[in-house]
Every structure is written in structure tokens, then in C-alpha cells.
Amino acid sequence: MADLNGKTIAIVATDGFEDSELTSPKEAVEQAGATTKVIATDAGEVEGKKGAKVAVDLTTADATVTDYDALILPGGTVNADTIRTDEKAVALVKAFKDAGKPIGVICHGGWILTEADLLKGVKLTSVANVKTDLVNAGANWVDEEVVVDSGFISSRTPDDLPAFNAALVEEFAK
């Protein structure tokens, strides 16, 4: 397994995240040696749609891309729809891409990438019901378990988490 010792991974989310799409990748990168920081629109904690509660380490207003080596964007319809309206979150995601840092995205998490205008010519996947939004933003959408392209690691649903987590660890270690 790849070694992520010394790496700090940002996870941007808010209430309504898909529980396993935040907790499973978080655990996977931590098991590989990384430190994770949960970044949200508000301080305190965020709650998943199935009740998982995760402490917020800092807000999107206080986060700086230089403090992190990679980014994870979990899904969950409410989470993804809310976080993409936060200008600071969108700016942070753009900053990760501009800095050439890898971005892991699963399910509805790709919505913020449309707001950040980062998808032109990028091959990626997502849950099927956001395909049109991603394609309209310029993505080359495919229906695959995990896709690695242009600095993005993408997957469709919680069923893909084993492959997604393995790809995250591998790509984040580079």
C-alpha cells in the first residue's frame, strides 16, 4: 500500500453528505498515514444524511490550499448542492486544481467542479443523475467504477468505495 505519511488531505463537506462517501475515504487515507482536515462552511460539526457526525476542523473562509496535499469531495445530494453555492469553497477547489493537487470526487461531489469551471475535456464519472450537468460543463463522462484523469480521481456511488479509496491512496502518494 502507498504511504501517505506527512501528507495532509482536505475534505470539503457540509450537512447532508453521504456518510460512507466521507467516512470511508477519510479512514482509507488515514490508514495510509495521512492527516485529514474537514473543511465546511460553518464551524462545529457536519452531519451526514444517515446521521454520521464529523467534527469540522476549519471553515472554507479560513482554509488555504498551501496547507494541503490533496482534496476529497464526498457526495450526498444536499451536501453537494449546498457546498457548491459557497464562494469560498468553490475558490478553494479552483485553488487545488490551479496548484496541481489531486482531487478525489464521488457521486454528487462533482457539482462543485461545474461551479469552479474545471471540467472542460476531463474524463470522469459520477452518479448517473448528475451526468448531464457534468457533460454540460465540458466533462467526458463515463460509467466506470473509478476514473483517474487530469488530476481527478472520480467514482460513482458507495458501491465503488473500495476501488475509489485504493485509487485515492495511490494517486495521493505520488
Image (cartoon, rainbow, N blue to C red):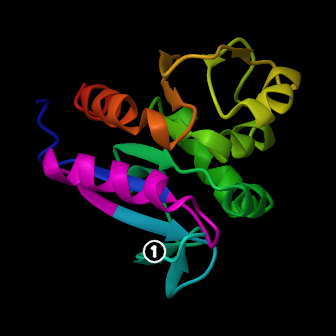
From the viewer's side, name the closer residue of 73 and 98: 73
Q: Looking at the picture, how far across and down is residue 38, in whole percent? A: 43, 67
Q: Is residue 1 left or right of residue 65?
A: left
Residue, far bottom: 44
Instruction: Name the residue located 41 percent from the left edge and 55 percent from the top edge.
Output: 10
Q: Position of residue 16 (x, y in %)?
A: 64, 68
In this rendering, the answer to whether 134 lies above or below 25 is above
Amino acid type at circle 1 is Ala
How crowded pointer 1 is (Cα within 10 Å; few <14, some 14-19, many 20+) is rated as some
Image quadrant in which you'd find residue 101: top left
Count of marks overlaid on the render: 1
Q: Is residue 142 above or below residue 50?
A: above
Residue in the image at 79% along x and 43% along y: 115
Q: Is residue 31 left or right of residue 116?
A: left
Dot 1 corresponds to which residue?
A: 52
Task: Pick the quarter of the image with the C terminus.
Answer: top left
Image side of residue 117 versus residue 159, left or right: right
- Rendering quarter of residue 168: top left
Image quadrant occupied by the N terminus: top left
Q: What residue do we see at 57% from left, 33% from top?
A: 98
Name which residue lies at 76% across and 64% down: 82
Q: Secondary structure at mark 1?
A: loop
Q: Does the stretch in magenta take in 51? A: no
Check if residue 27 falls in the magenta segment.
yes
Q: Which residues are magenta?
A: 12-36
Residue 110 location (% of width, % of height): 67, 39
**Residue 102 visible in the snapshot:** no
Report x, y in % for residue 78.
73, 63
Nearest the viewer among 28 and 127 is 127
| Front residue (pair 42, 164) | 164
Q: From this viewpoint, is residue 38 visible?
A: yes
